[in-house]
Image (spheres, helix red, strand yellow):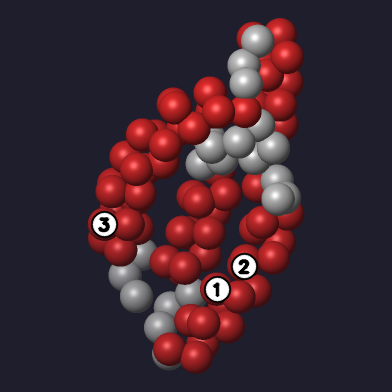
Amino acid sequence: MINNAATVVLMAPIGLTVAGGLGISPDPLLMATAVGASCAFLTPIGHQSNTLVMGPGGYKFGDYWRMGLPLEIIILAAGIPLILFFWPA
């Protein structure tokens, strides 16, 4: 498991390669990578802020799933159509 910044460093070149292979604009794939990396709600490892509040807030690892999963589903449902609308392939 890695944090969100390292995920972008690994996934952005993959998105560029996939876009080149499919012959489409890399913009929607890179934007999806950026949005996905900024939505690190499921674990305390995903973002530094999650780790900082875990101890003082008395949160457990599973607490992040309880609130993070609905947020991730909302962002996924809204993000894909909006990315394709503003950055067409």
Q: Residues at badges 3 and 2 in contact (C-beta under 8 Å)?
A: no
Mark 3–mark 2 Cα distance, whole angstroms, equals 20 Å
Residue 55 seen in render: yes
Q: Which quadrant would residue 40 be assigned to in this image? A: top right
Q: Secondary structure at mark 2?
A: helix
The vertical placement of 66 against 19, above or below, is above
80 is higher (above) or lower (below) than 43: below
The answer to whether residue 83 is left or right of residue 29 is left
Which label sits on residue 27?
none
Looking at the rendered structure, the kind of residue marked 2 is Ala
Say which residue label 2 marks: 12
Q: Could you classify mark 1 by the number of other residues whose Cα lies within 10 Å: few (under 14), some (14-19), or many (20 or more)?
A: many
- Residue 49, position as x, y percentages in the image: 67, 26
Q: CA distance from mark 1 to mark 2?
A: 5 Å
Q: Could you tell me if the residues under marks 1 and 2 are in contact, i.e. CB atoms within 8 Å?
A: yes
Residue at coordinates 41% horizontally, 41% vertically from top-left?
A: 72
Residue 81 is labelled as: 3
Residue that numbered label 1 is attached to: 15
Q: Are marks 1 and 3 in contact (CB under 8 Å)?
A: no
Residue 28: x percent and y percent? 42, 66
Location of residue 43 by image quarter: top right
Amino acid type, mark 1: Gly
* 49 relative to 68 in the view: left or right: right
In-image side of 69 versus 49 (left or right): left
Q: Earlier in the sequence, mark 1 or mark 3?
A: 1
User: For this rendering, which residue is in front, 81 or 66?
Assistant: 66
* Three-letter amino acid code of the residue under disc 3: Pro
